[in-house]
Image (spheres, grey):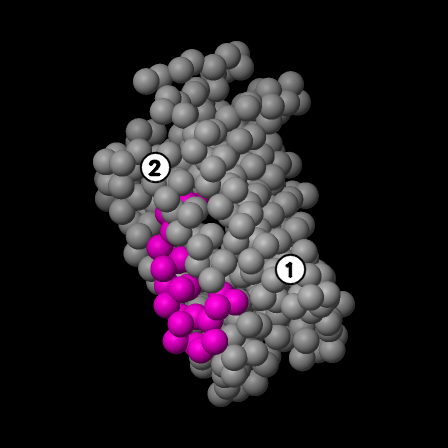
Amino acid sequence: MENAARRTHIYAFCAATTLFWFAMYTYVPILAPYVEHLGGSLSMAGLVVGSYGFTQMLVRIPIGFASDRLGRRKPFVILGLCLAAASSLGLGIATGPTAALIFRGTAGLAAGTWVAFSVLFASYLPPDQTARSMGLLMFFTTMGQTLATTIGGVLVDLLGWKAPFFVGAAAGFLSLLLTGAVAESPAASARSIDLADLARVGSDRQLLKVSGLGIVFQALTYASVHGFTPSYAVQLGASGTDLSILALISALPAAVISLWIGALTDRLGERTILVGSIVLFAGAVLVIPLSTRLGTLYLSQALGSVGRGTIMPVLMSLAIKEVAAEYRATAMGFYQSIYALGMTLGPVVMGLVGDAVGLRFGFVLIGLLGFAAAGLARQWIPGESRTVTRSGRHTFQD
């Protein structure tokens, strides 16, 4: 691929990625309170938030397998953009919590295509720059989420509860216009991958360990940042604009730090970065109940965002960087499908605990779970990396 053409594809892809996540995150700061506004309980709010992860869990392995078998990524990217726009629109016209549950689940179907997004973007850079490509992709992902969540609460204050959903839908439709400039994977072609290959990739022990850490990370994220931290802020007296400020503070440091992932992992190593980042994020969740003012809540979430911004790209890199090209979407599908369990269970459990004994105890519970995950990461992430070959054997590199 010529350099100029490759740059065009990368720019278009980054813009489409930003709008894709913008479409699904304009309403995230107000989603749990919105479900309560529609008449739902905290438990129902947890189900709505968790449905996003549940539907991803169902579709990501099939999408990854189909993408590898067809040797194509772009059709799945287009499908994801369409579903993102439809889910935002559906949430905007919802009149009750059940409709909100259905259309937030549709957003999860859209996010399920992130398998194809990830692998397609990784193909634009050399294989030895996987960490850098994932960090760059996470920057535009987080920037889309940051811009969306920042204006979401403001839109509620200015135009009412429905406004964030309609703005998100507009962004989703706009992203479709950019797909004409997005190229198919340079190395993509139809593969003879079969169910035996699927089982072989999915049974890889290191992939399962990385995926297990992903479950805990997503549980913390969707129980707190994308779940009930805004509800806790409302209990402290936050307005819609205050929720936007909280969302910005919770996201911007993550976006900025993700640009440095390649340099940080080269210097300190993936295991060191991952363990330290999980501790920082889990600590920020654990201290939420100690925040009695919005200012202290802002500070804790800004610090947690630094950790959160490094965890995701490092785990994504570990999931696929040493996997043969023909298996990458399948491996990413397994990883993303398994970690979606955390997206589902985190907010559901948090909602149940919140109804039973209050949100404060829930934050302590999941914060401690995060510290346990940091200990597992210290044991599970080795100094060497593994390669899944065509025959299914593993080679180890120092």
State the mark number for residue 236: none
Q: Secondary structure at mark 1?
A: helix
Crowding around mark 2 (Cα neighbors within 10 Å: few <14, some 14 to 19, many 20+) is some
- Identified at 60% across, 23% down, the residue is 203
Q: Provide the residue designation for mark 1.
A: 350
Q: Reading the chain from its start, which is encountered first: label 1 or label 2? A: 2
Q: Provide the residue designation for mark 2.
A: 272
Extent of the magenta region:
288-312
- Residue nearest the observer in this picture, 283 or 11: 283
- Identified at 56% across, 78% down, the residue is 235
Q: Amino acid at mark 2?
A: Thr
- Is 305 included in the stretch rendered in magenta? yes
Contact between marks 1 and 2 (CB within 8 A): the answer is no
Crowding around mark 1 (Cα neighbors within 10 Å: few <14, some 14 to 19, many 20+) is many
Tell which residue pokes out farthest to the bottom in this image. Answer: 158
Which x, y percent locates residue 117? 47, 45
Q: Is residue 286 above or below residue 331?
A: below
- Residue nearest the observer in this picture, 279 or 342: 279
- Residue nearest the observer in this picture, 131 or 183: 131
Asked whether residue 36 is in view, the answer is yes
